[in-house]
Amino acid sequence: MLRIPWTGKKTNERVLNEANKRRSLVRTIRKRQATFLGHVMRRGKLEHLVTTGKFEGKRSRGRQREKIMDGLATWLGPGKVSDILATVKDRDLWRDMIANAYKQGN
């Protein structure tokens, strides 16, 4: 990034500060998850059932996995999963919500 030799003994945070950059991998992943969720929810097929977790049957043993919806609900800001599912139907409002969450850097 800044042509720093490997013998420079600098931390990643220090290099990022010198380059005026921020870590953005998690934000990028969340943004892509949110756009995919909007696509799937508007379509309303099998993927809709999988992401909302409305399958019948037994749950697996052990600690439950984090659902995509729960992770996106915390990333998009205060609100319930039901509010998010209602927002998905309006594409423009959904895009604005994703853009605002991405700009805030959550």
Image (cartoon, rainbow, N blue to C red):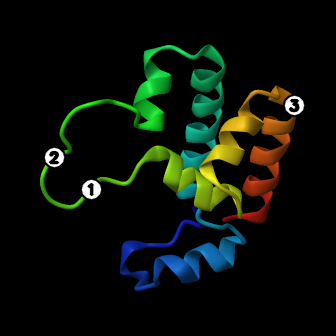
In the rendered view, would you say 25 is above or below 23? above
| Camera-nearest residue between 32 and 23 | 32
Q: Which residue lies furthest to the left in this view?
A: 61
Task: Please tell me whether mark 2 or mark 3 is closer to you in this view.
Answer: 2
| Camera-nearest residue between 66 and 57 | 57
In the rendered view, would you say 81 is above or below 13? above
Amino acid tagged 1: Gln
Q: Which residue is drawn at 61% across and 49% down?
A: 81
Which element carries disc 3, helix, strand or loop? helix
Badge number at residue 92: 3
- Residue identifier under label 1: 64
| Camera-nearest residue between 21 and 46 | 46
In the rendered view, would you say 4 is above or below 50? below
- Residue identifier under label 2: 60
**Residue 9 location in percent, x, y?**
40, 85
Q: Distance between the residues labelled 1 and 3?
A: 33 Å
